[in-house]
Amino acid sequence: MYFGLSGGKQAEEINKIRLNEFDSFCIEEGFDYAHIIDSSVDLVNHIDESVDIIMLPSYVDWQTDHRLVNDIVIEYLKKSKLNPEIMLYNITVPLSDKFTNFVHPMNKKEQNCKYLMFSNHYTSQRSMPTKRFMYQERSSGKIINKYAGERFYILSLKEYLEILRVLNNDFNEKSLNKLYNYINKLRMVYKESKQIYDFI
């Protein structure tokens, strides 16, 4: 699902560009997809009883739009009678070992292919620190004795609602934003983010 949430002064123009990139990627790869324009209507049409798991970016993320996606989807789920599992993944802040219960393995060829696809389709985001992401995945691969790996945390909706309750009560946004200072220092960002995860 594409929510079109991006910050900055040129958000509207950026959203159009990234929407086109997202569409072209899904069409070329043969993926089903949906645009979420009005969450109160569109989520009803696309999240129903047939959905047994929902993937969301971890709430422990300095990007406010990543946290907002969580808020929108979780608010809808709380109002509905649906009870899917939640599968968290990391983007800018790595998941801690405590919040990792599944690692998807990748060999060198698969990892290189992943970032080649990213570079080819998402030209507006070529400034992303993909090298850091690749090193992060190499580190995660050690957990399962593979070349590289993508971390996930799978939990029940009830468990995730409790985590969000704790975070919303005591969420220290300054501590999270401080992590940006360590964006290219993997050891430090792991160490500092672990403190936030350990608090939960």
Image: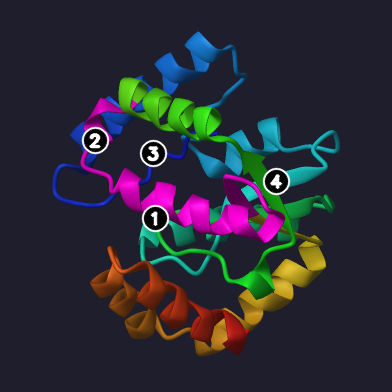
Q: Which badge, 1 or 2, is on the more N-terminal residue?
A: 1
Residue 141 rendering spot, x and y as whole percentages: 60, 52
Q: CA distance from mark 4 to mark 3?
A: 18 Å
**In the rendered structure, which segment of residues is drawn in magenta?**
122-151
Residue at mark 4: 54
Q: Amino acid at mark 4?
A: Ile
Give the residue drawn at x 42%, y 82%.
Answer: 192
Q: Which badge, 4 or 3, is on the more N-terminal residue?
A: 3
Q: Are marks 4 and 3 in contact (CB under 8 Å)?
A: no
Q: Secondary structure at mark 1?
A: helix
Residue at mark 2: 126
Q: CA distance from mark 1 to mark 4?
A: 17 Å
Residue 160 rendering spot, x and y as whole percentages: 71, 68
Q: Secondary structure at mark 3?
A: loop
Q: Residues within 10 Å of mark 2 (few under 14, many from 20)?
A: few
Name the outermost residue toward the left.
Answer: 9
Q: Are marks 1 and 3 in contact (CB under 8 Å)?
A: no
Residue 74 rendering spot, x and y as whole percentages: 64, 58
State the count of labels: 4
Q: Which badge, 2 or 4, is on the more N-terminal residue?
A: 4
Q: CA distance from mark 3 to mark 2?
A: 18 Å
